[in-house]
Amino acid sequence: MFQTLQKLRVICFMFATTAERKVPPTPSNMPFTLNNLWDNPGARKIQKRWGRSGTRGNACGRGQRGQGARSGAGVPPKFEGGQTPLTRRLPKWGAKPSLELYREVNICQIIDRIKQGRIDATQPIQIKDMLESRIFSKCKHGVKLLARGAERLSELNTPLTIEVSDASKTAIDAIKKAGGEVKVVYFTPLLLRQHLFPDKYPLELRPALPPSRAVEAIQRSEERGAVADYIKPKWVIEEEIEKKKLEEMAKLEVDTLKVQLQGAETVETAKKEKKKKKQKQQEEKQVSTLDLTNFKYPVSREPGCGKDKIKQRKPVVYKKLSLNLD
């Protein structure tokens, strides 16, 4: 009996309205203040609870077994059932981030190590010397020289020659102004490791041919004023040969123009001479045509001249014909 009453109570609670469940009875004389607030009837709803009884019991609408029946189940919207998704099928384009992260070293750090006696300023300062002097502890791709502390170069008596992977324009200008030199050297990660730790490599590795991207970076550093040391690929050598040819052609053209202008006092007189030559050429072309008005004899027509040039007719030779009428 008690169990049946309890079940009836639960059923009545399930079919009760939200106003009956949540909202307390509010007399008309009760003031609506901050300490006495309530929701409108039907404003709040209780969340549905599955797996109790009725049509949403047992499997709770998830079906029987499978991916959708598990807790936390579901796939992302981009999932295409196992086939290659669209994000992987489409080609990728655009700028790629550079994977070569150079270790940045300032000029002031090198000057401090020189004053401490860790680096010899009379010899070329290489990446190996920077590692041994504890400017940095690790270096995988190379070193880039920056211009911080460039005004302290006047403190040194000897000019510096620094070998790095890259350098800024201000750093190159400052070192060149002090009488030094910045040398850009190409290293692969393996060659750089051999340079830093030569004891681990009993045989010396061959220098590597840089790719086009690295060659373009080295050429940019050369334009800034650095000296480059790398194996030049074939296309770079061909470009240099073509540039030299063009420069030589330009020099020859300049020399010929100078020789032409030596006879003329100014450029204007030379232009006038060119115009006169053009006019003469046009006149000669007109003479070559069959206009009798502009026709001129090539030689003087005096009596007795040109006798040999007069064409004579060939003598006519008659043949005899014999006819037999018999």
Image (cartoon, grey):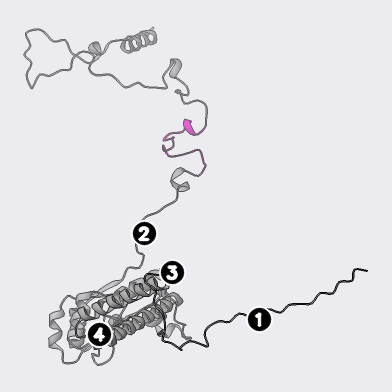
Q: Residues within 10 Å of mark 2 (few under 14, many from 20)?
A: few
At label 1, counting other C-alpha atoms closer than 10 Å, the crowd grade (few under 14, some 14-19, many 20 or more) is: few
Q: Earlier in the sequence, mark 3 or mark 1?
A: 3
Position in image of residue 101 (x %, y %): 32, 68
Q: Nearer the viewer, mark 3 or mark 1?
A: 1
User: Which of the numbered marks, if any, corresponds to residue 292?
Assistant: none
Dot label at residue 290: 3
Residue 231 is drawn in which quadrant?
bottom left
Residue type beneath disc 1: Pro
Q: Nearer the viewer, mark 3 or mark 2?
A: 3
Which of the two discs, 3 and 4, labels the residue nearer the N terminus? 4
Of badges 4 and 1, the one in the foreground is 1
Question: Which mark sits nearer the N-terminus, 1 or 2?
Answer: 2
Which residues are drawn in magenta?
Answer: 66-83
Asked whether the beta carbons under mark 3 and mark 1 sit within 8 Å of each other, the answer is no
Residue 96 disc label:
2
> Mark 4 or mark 1, which has the lower sequence index?
4
**Closer to the camera: disc 2 or disc 4?**
4
